Amino acid sequence: MKIKTKKSTYEKVMALPRPEHKRPLRPHFLFRLLIRLLSIPDLLSARFTYVAERMELVGDQPCLILMNHSSFIDLKIASKIFFPKPFCIVCTSDGFIGKNWLMRLIGCIPTNKFVSDIKLIGDMRYALQEKQCSVLMYPEASYTFDGTATPLPRKLGVLLKKLNVPVVTVNTFGAFSREPLYNCLQKRKKVSVQAKVRCLLTPEEIRERSVAEIDAMLDEAFTFDGFAWQRENHVEIDESFRADGLNRILYRCAACGAEGHMVGKGIHLKCHHCGKVYEMDKLGRLKALQGKTEFSHIPDWYRWQRRQVRKELEEGTYKLEADVKIGMLVDRKAIYMVGEGHLHHDENGFTLTGCDGKLQYSQGPLTCYSLYADYYWYEIADVICIGTNDELYYCFPKGGDVVAKTRLATEELYKMKKRRPVRVKTEEAATV
């Protein structure tokens, strides 16, 4: 799927009017039917099935649907499970580009990923209470990179208490294995997809539990491992391209520690610094062709990289320096390509400069707990996105696999800064 882009200057883009906020619409039955019909071929190809638990507690009343985000098939799965029940969809704002009218008519609620959006809560309550329409939300906000859960926002339980509706979880199995984000949009056609649909909490159960207890339940509900699922269920993937793009998530060699020299192609992952080669078998496991296999389980390798990033942050040696092409989102008409610049990231957060010195944007490390980052974004390139509710900056690095490491660094840096006590001078403390 592609997105409309338009070349412009930074000054012209900044002068454009921002879109007016509009309340969500209840999706019309004909549009719900259309989405359902368009989903049928892909779901048949995936041999999709699902099981339901405690759904009798929901009945026909509006509910909050929380679904893990593993693949492009996720929305099609939701259309199958809940049809003809009307539901609005919390959707990234860039999904509205060039089709704003259509996205509104099918009930989409726009928001910017990993940007504080107070209006979103009001829109969700409006859909649930005034329009008597369920709301589908992907609480992880971003697709999983390594097939395991991405961080959930803390105190999500506060939102559940405010909404006061049943909470339904949808967990998919096989969606990641069929079409992992790193694999250059190539589908593994022999993989079947299943889902488990469950009423996690009724309004009464939400009232009885603390926010911390609800958050713990959500963490448990959104704990998964796509590669472990594949291995445990003996799902063989024999496509010859199964390791294509694997270097996007495994960017650091586990043997020599070098970064930016990994290449995933065919069924092999190779480090062009030390020459070590790993083969990805049909069950998604890695094995070194010679010598020790440091990590056979890909998420273990990814977690090791996270620990290395954390160590760099603690030692003060972490730094991203990337020349980038810059796109901007300020309305729902296009991604405006405003030129080139430089993206810097360290313990103080992000700094983006460019457009002949006209663009200078900084974002602190406590801005958000994670990062909007994606692979082959709308078939353009790998992307890192930062910004505010008024302007989003889509940064397309010109070289190297920096996306995964930058997201890991953002998450670890947030945790470090959040837990670090704030020091104040004695005189200042006395006046508090």
Image (tube, helix red, strand yellow):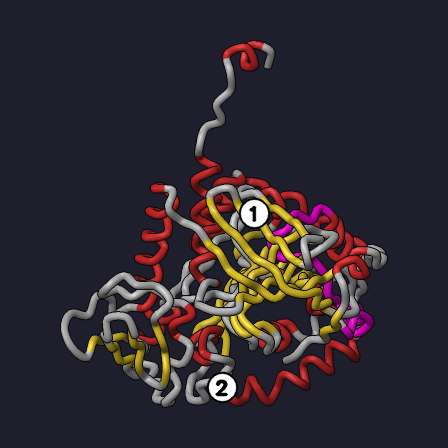
Report which quarter residue 199 is drawn in: bottom right
In this view, 243 is above or below 373: below
Left or right: where 351 falls relative to 37: left
- Earlier in the chain: of badge 2 and badge 1, it is 2
The reply to whether residue 210 is in sight is yes
Left or right: where 35 falls relative to 384: right
Residue at the image position 71 percent from the left and 52 percent from the top: 389
Looking at numbered disc 1 in the image, what kind of residue is underneath it? Cys
Residue 416 percent coordinates (x, y): 43, 40
Secondary structure, mark 1, is loop
Q: Which mark is residue 47?
A: 2
Q: Nearer the viewer, mark 2 or mark 1?
A: 1
Residue hosting label 1: 368
Left or right: where 429 falls relative to 421: right
In front of the other: 55 or 15 = 15
Position of the N terminus by quadrant: bottom right
In front of the other: 353 or 89 = 353
Residue 326 percent coordinates (x, y): 64, 64
Secondary structure, mark 2, is loop
In this view, 372 is above or below 147: above
Residue at the image position 61 percent from the left and 60 percent from the top: 341
Looking at numbered disc 2 in the image, what kind of residue is underneath it? Arg
Asked if the stretch drawn in magenta spans residue 108, the answer is yes
- Magenta stretch, residue numbers: 98-118
The reply to whether residue 91 is in sight is no
Position of the C terminus by quadrant: top right
Q: Which mark is residue 345?
A: none
Asked if the stretch drawn in magenta spans residue 388, the answer is no
Farthest front residue in view: 356
